[in-house]
Amino acid sequence: MAVIYGEQYVDEKYASAIEPNLYTDTVLVPGMTYTDKWQEGPAGGIYVHKLTTDAVAVGTPGTDFSDEGADDDLIPIILNNNFQKSRKIYGVQSSSVAFNAGEEYLADALSAVRQGRQYSALACMAYEGTTYGDTTTITKDNVVGYLTGMREAVKKAHGKANFALVSTGVYALLLQVVGIQSYADEAVKSGELLKRFGLNIIECNSFDTTSAKFYDNGGTKRTVNLKQVDIIVGASDEFACIDNFNMYRLIDSENFAGSKAQVEINSGFHVMVADCIQVKKNAVSA
């Protein structure tokens, strides 16, 4: 539609910079919220040895050893979750806009694929982890109790509890309860909550969909309502997230005059010890 100042038509122009699409924050951080130490290849499935063990009983000096046979279990991590995005960019389109269409579409495709991968990883964590307590609503009065109680549950399972993913609503409560009160701890005074109770506390705005999907190790597609997740407290070493293929390219098309911006990641997810990933849920259904 033409722009008129008074009775004068004025020039119009399309901006050379674009408004980026918004994606959820990245909460998948190796060594902080998951481990990639099992990433080996080439393989479509990694099988991790877990030695069986029994408690050692006390005895008296001068006792012979009692030999036990070597015995282990295998924990599978099947890389069967694939994420792809491809954008067609006709040459006549890219030559008619002021921004670099190829670079912008490629960057946006990468962000979209990474977000999809994160949703699936969180769905796996919520589905295969251990549900903590009931669906009681989180409030200012009970939020710290749930956080420390879930940490205790991980520690009782002998896990190294080191992270907490919390919904935006729970994070807001923590800022009010922990961030505003007066404490000697400078990190708490500032309200950053990057480290508290021995946990890296991370606000997760990916708990916003009712249908996050992933394929489990048996090849079954699972659907998880992430809106029902308030808090996940866990030991990062006990949640595996590995890739065996990453592709990021801008290529000329053989079918039309133009290019394709393509991104693909193939991943596998698995909770290694369920009791070391504690999941507090609510009763939200949609």
Image (cartoon, helix red, strand yellow):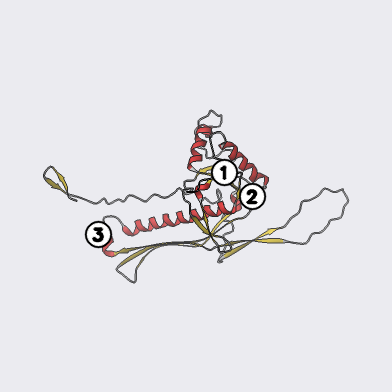
The secondary element bearing badge 1 is classed as loop
Tell which circle, 1 or 2, labels the residue nearer the N-terminal end. Answer: 1
Residue at image x 48%, y 56%?
117
Could you tell me the amino acid type at mark 3?
Ser
What is the spatial separation of the Cα atoms under label 1 and label 2, in whole angstroms?
18 Å
In the displayed structure image, the side of residue 40 where residue 251 appears, left or right: left
Counting from the top left corner in percent of width and height, residue 105 is at 35, 58
What is the spatial separation of the Cα atoms under label 1 and label 3, in whole angstroms?
54 Å
Could you tell me the amino acid type at mark 2?
Asp
For residue 75, above or below residue 132: below
**Label 3 Cα crowd, 10 Å radius (few <14 / some 14-19 / many 20+):** few
Residue extending farthest to the left is 7
Residue that mark 1 sits on: 135
Residue that mark 2 sits on: 275
The secondary element bearing badge 3 is classed as loop
Residue that mark 3 sits on: 96
